[in-house]
Image (tube, coloured by chain):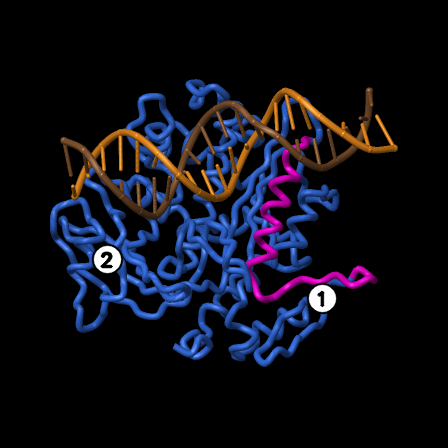
Chain colours: A blue, B brown, C orange
Amino acid sequence: MTYHSVDQLQNILANNVFNYTRDPKKAAGRSLGTMVEIITFYLLKSWGLEQSLSIERSLAEYGNPDITHNVEYSLHPILQQCEVFFSEKLPITSTKILSSIDKNVFSITRFEKSNNSLLTSDLILRNSCLIASSKELYSSHLVANLAFISNDDYKIIISQQYEKPYAIFECKRVGIEEGIKKGPQSIEKAKQGAYVARMLSSLQKVRMPSGELYGLIYKFNNEICIKPYAELMAEIMESENPSLLCDFILTVGVVSNHGNWFTSDNHNKELKVLAQSYDWLIFLTDKGLSEFINHILLDSESNFEPVKKAFLESYNIKRKRTRFTKVQIDYKADQILQLYFSDNLIGVENWFNVISPKDKSMQELKSQIFRLKNKNWREIHSL
DNA sequence: CCGGTTCCATGGGGATCGAG
DNA sequence: CTCGATCCCCATGGAACCGG
């Protein structure tokens, strides 16, 4: 297999794919960001979180809903779920899906329909397709996912997600400048990411004069709970107490290395800023990202041909419509990616290193997420 | 000049709306 | 319903700028 560093891959993409743009290297860098997003999405999907997942929802800051941030991936409590079998002509629009729901099972009167299509007539799938949302703040929204297609019959799963998530994922990437060891641009994005990571959850991070990190959380009736961060986090994980959980959001950052960031002890400032801001910071290694790109784009004799085709059709001066992003993806490419990730789940998990918390593993991250997923959110939010 | 911060051009995505 | 326009948001990376 051809191995390239990510920098080499960026140059290959710049020269061969993005040569039509004014700044090919920048556009290639942007597309590597898309790859990180796609890898993260299919990882979450192969963990079985698809029905809980929303993409690019606007989330309010804790205690300050005036300010909102669009968050890449968020995991929400599922309030209700139903399946629909469906054999109409493409596209599968929100209107068609909503009209096929049994209203006795699932009341949709409080919802406002979206204009999204789950599957377009030229087979572009919309991941975590938002079909309707409720107008009231912090209520819920409906997400549709395509389970499978057989003989023009479509099985669709519709999940009603509670608006307030229990976990979020954000993907970031920073590139190295040609011939320069350390760039100026990364710190700004690190700070932007850090700001969002620190503003969404009720669990606030506080530094003691000694340097020790504490967690602070307001309980009901104005009681403040403050204790060492790791201890408080463990308590939240164990807890079913609504006042600890109702506004808690586990924040996860996914970063990828591009020359000036290191997985070694040699963390630079940007990485330190992010590591202390997210609850979890995981690092997609060069090896992982290169392996993915080599497989889907550069391997000439692979069965990833439809994935490669979708990518090239998306980034091309004559392109009609993008079909290779975390949201809109070519249906065939999606099927291949799903299979690839579920068949190679252990390998994919090994593409990541955990940077913080120190000495934790991807398996522990996974188990924390499932622990949260399985809490009784109806009770916690008194629904 | 050095090592940083701030600014900004460019690429891209999603939601929404209105014309056809 | 479809498509394009528009608005808003975010990411990437290079240039300008600044204090010592």
Residue A298, x across and y down, in percent: 43, 28
Please provide the residue range marked out in magenta: A183-211
Q: Specify which label sits upstream in the sequence, 1 or 2.
A: 2
Reading the image, the residue beneath label 1 is A214
Chain under disc 2: A
Marks 1 and 2: same chain?
A: yes
Question: In the rendered view, does A275 fall on the left or right side of A246?
Answer: right
Q: Residue at x 27, y 58 (%)?
A: A112
Reading the image, the residue beneath label 2 is A156
Q: Quadrant of residue C20?
A: top right
Note whether A143 is above or below A319 in the view shown: below
Q: Residue at x 28, y 57 (%)?
A: A132
Note whether C10 is above or below A55 in the view shown: above
| Residue type at numbered disc 2 | Ile
Q: Quadrant of residue C3?
A: top left
Q: Residue at x 68, y 71 (%)?
A: A231
Q: Are marks 1 and 2 in contact (CB under 8 Å)?
A: no
Residue A119, x across and y down, in percent: 24, 46
Numbered disc 2: secondary structure: strand
Question: In the rendered view, does A89 fall on the left or right side of C8?
Answer: left
Numbered disc 1: secondary structure: strand
Disc 2 crowd rating (10 Å Cα; few below 14, some 14-19, many 20+) is many
Question: Is residue A185 in the magenta section?
Answer: yes
Question: Is residue A170 in the magenta section?
Answer: no
Q: Residue at x 27, y 62 (%)?
A: A111
| Residue type at numbered disc 1 | Tyr
Query: Does the image show residue A363?
Result: no
Residue A117, x across and y down, in percent: 25, 47
Q: Quadrant of residue A190?
A: top right
Residue A216, x across and y down, in percent: 66, 69
